[in-house]
Image: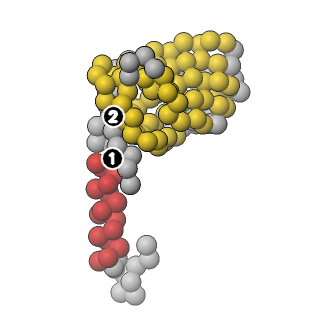
Amino acid sequence: MPPTRDGRLHATDVARLAGFHERLTALFAEDLGAGRQVGWRVTSERTAVAAVDLADTVRVGLARLEEDITQGQAVARDTLLGADEGNWRVLARGTTIGYARLDRFPPTRVRRVRVVVEDAVSAPAPLRITVYANAAP
C-alpha cells in the first residue's frame, strides 16, 4: 500500500489492513489439537504417517503442516485425512510441505487427523500438524 503524497497511509487502506488482521487473528485463534501429541511412524525409506487424536469431534476447515527443514525439505507428496467415527476422508492432497503449508478444505467434523507421506526425496522426519476450525472467507 503506497503512502499518500504527504507520506501517510490512506484511511481506507488502514481500515482494510485492520480488517485483514482481525480476520487472521480469528482464523488462527485456536489450535484444536494444542497439547496433543502427534504420533509418527516411518513406513519405508520414503514414506511415513503422522496422526493426532483431537480428543473430541470438532469441525475443522484449515490445517497447517510443517516439516523441519534444517536438513532440507523432504516431503514430495502427501495426503491429509480426517476421521470421526472411523471413516477416513481425504481433506487435502499436496506435493510439498517445506517450512509450512496451509491446506484449506470444506469444514468437516473430525476427531482424528492423519497425514500420509506418500513419497519423500529423503527419509521423512516428524511433522507438526495444527488444525483450525473455520476456513470460510
Question: What amino acid does circle 2 point to?
Answer: Arg
Q: Is residue 64 left or right of residue 14?
A: right
For label 2, count other residues whose C-alpha is less than 10 Å away and answer few (under 14), some (14-19) or many (20+): some
Q: Position of residue 98 (x, y in %)?
A: 58, 36
Q: Is residue 48 above or below residue 77?
A: above
Residue 109 sits in quarter: top left
Q: Is residue 27 above or below residue 34?
A: below
> Which labelled disc corresponds to residue 27?
1
Q: Residue at x 32, y 54 (%)?
A: 23
Q: Position of residue 76 (x, y in %)?
A: 67, 32
Q: Is residue 32 above or below residue 38?
A: below
Residue occupied by mark 2:
59
- Name the N-terminal-most of marks 1 and 2: 1
- Tell how many labels: 2
Q: Is residue 110 left or right of residue 94?
A: left
Q: Position of residue 50 (x, y in %)?
A: 50, 20
